[in-house]
Amino acid sequence: MDVDYIIVGAGSSGSVLASRLSEGARVVVLEAGGSDLLPYVQLPLGYGKLFYDPAVNWMYATEPDPGLAGNRDHWPRGKLLGGSSSINAMVYIRGHKADYDEWGAAAPGWGWGDVLPAFRAMEDNEAGADDFRGKGGPLFISRNRKGLHWLVEDYIAACGEAGLAYNPDFNGAEQEGAGTYQMTIKGGRRNSAARAFLRPAMKRCQVITRAQVTRVIFEGKRAVGVEYLRDGELQTLRAREVILSGGAINTPQLLQLSGIGPAEVLSRAGIPVLVDNPHVGRNLSDHQGINYTWEMKVATYNGILRPWWGKAFVGLQYLLTRGGPLAKSINHGGGFFRTSADEPRPNMQLYFQAFSTLIPRNGERPLLTPDPFQGVSIGLSNCRPTSRGTIEIASPDPMRHPKITANAFSTEKDVAEMLLAVKYLRTIAAQPSFARWVKQELRPGPEVQSDEAMIQDFRERSGTVYHPSCTARMGREGESVVDEHLRVRGVEGLRVCDASAFPNLIAGNTNAPALLMGWRGAEVIRG
Ligand SMILES: Cc1cc2nc3c(=O)[nH]c(=O)nc-3n(C[C@H](O)[C@H](O)[C@H](O)COP(=O)(O)OP(=O)(O)OC[C@H]3O[C@@H](n4cnc5c(N)ncnc54)[C@H](O)[C@@H]3O)c2cc1C
């Protein structure tokens, strides 16, 4: 064997895993993308420029989705060191503790009591340590309290007037409420998994970039290495164990290309079946989100980010102080709420953005050139959707994108709760603290009032909030792809450690649980 572990993918989970496993073993990381040392990766608000950039992004498109009025959704995924943590919006949310109790019920060792110590050990919270937060770990997390747009306070006040109380810490004792998001931003720069975990570990593990793994090599049913493409040449690398950390789309694709998956999907694609497991690429879970946008009577970030002189000002401010709007995510404020008192825990997430981007620009999400009027958006996304999609290879060619069928809003429950949620958005906006600054609702606009019109609107305008998960999920035999030790069922020497292995989608953004997967995964693998 050439090495102990091959890790496929240097994303959120893979970076943490590489950092921890290389403390006592020979580790090689194979990453399909290149370096993360690029200006728009490092600059927090720069990530709008990466949305449609094939140099750092896999640029997936879903199949036309009936639940989204027939639209094909754009699914960016990071293709560079740090993976999607190098192109994401940097919001740091762990999820609800009950989400992890569900994980623990499906996979012993992954319950809240097991993951809380792991989160605390991994974190270096600016706010300091307490029963929930950690201090002194490798991952700096900013409190994000300074330099916020003043409208954030009025947004939080309006939530209070609408019955959603202020919550100082969504990662603390209680998730519900309105407040500001903690961020994976350090010193005004993106704090990706590459920056926090992989780069400091590069002295002790080998990272090969621009190396796309094309299949796992088996001897009988034992994984002994991988085949990968680099500079147009097919190469092989052997190891004691192979760990797939390619993310929720690429990991099931690679399993299927290697003969592990639903037999009918593999046969259709001309791949010999090694293990017939119908769960590979199934159970795709993702949050769907939508923005409501208002024109305001007061200055928002549109006024400073759009004109050339404003760009020069915020650019200088960033260079001199590492502060200002460029040093932040778009989501200054947020929240979690229930659409009905019967819900046992929050089932909707809020995002407050002190600017608006209704007018598209070619090849980018126009975060750095927002609309030519003063606008703000409040967005929301569901926390525990019941709709499920699939990832299926359509060809034996590893360079061809797999077929992504999202099936968004394909259950009545998901439609009904989103309808209640968008109504609540308008309730928040109608409260005095917010309404006094509003000139008019721009999107969807006051003419959209009936239930039918509101449903039609969110079907037409919703899309992924970039949290696909669970496509090679961990769980009980007969219901899963990997066991609680992350071992792929039916073979030896092969594990999965990334968002595809989540037993269930958590309530919130998925970078923190993906980092946790790497941290706790290393403990499980070493154990
Ligand atoms: C635009 C966007 C915004 C987001 N915003 C937030 C946010 O604000 N907060 C939050 O918590 N989450 C956010 N997320 C989600 C979060 O970043 C992801 O859930 C998380 O990074 C997933 O981690 P992962 O390890 O599963 O996969 P990834 O981080 O995507 O890593 C997979 C890695 O594997 C590599 N790879 C794949 N296939 C191969 C192969 N065959 N060979 C070699 N390498 C391969 C990829 O190039 C990539 O580097 C966002 C995601 C996106 C895309």
Image (cartoon, rainbow, N blue to C red):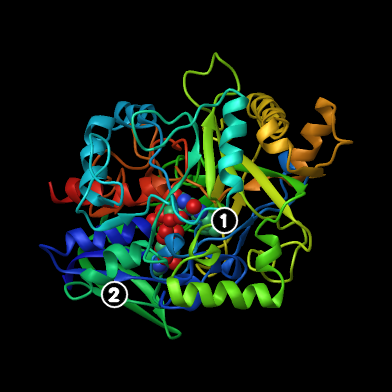
Give the percent coordinates (x, y) of residue 413.
63, 24
Q: Position of residue 183 (x, y in %)?
A: 42, 53
- Give amino acid for label 1: Ile
Q: Looking at this rendering, what residue extends furthest in the top direction?
A: 342
Is 326 in front, or is 58? 326
Can residue 54 be seen in the rendering of this structure?
A: no
Which residue is more in the foreground, 455 or 2?
Answer: 455
Q: Secondary structure at mark 2?
A: strand
Residue 369 place in picture, x, y as percent: 69, 68
Q: Residue at x 24, y 58 (%)?
A: 138
Residue 434 is drawn in which quadrant?
top right
Above or below, 49 relative to 387: below
Q: Secondary structure at mark 1?
A: loop
* Residue 314 visible: yes
Is 301 left or right of 181, judged from the image as shown? right
Image quadrant containing the N terminus: bottom left
Above/below status of 178 relative to 301: above
Identify residue for label 1. 330
Quadrant hosting ligand 1: bottom left
Mark 2: amino acid: Val
> In percent of the image, x 47 and y 28: which residue is there?
176
Q: Which residue is mark 2?
A: 207
Whether the residues at callouts 2 and 1 have beta carbons within 8 Å, the answer is no
In this rendering, position of residue 410 left or right of residue 212: right
Determine the residue positioned at 51% across, 56% down: 89
Mark 2–mark 1 Cα distance, whole angstroms, equals 31 Å
Q: Nearer the viewer, mark 2 or mark 1?
A: 1
Q: Residue furthest right?
A: 447
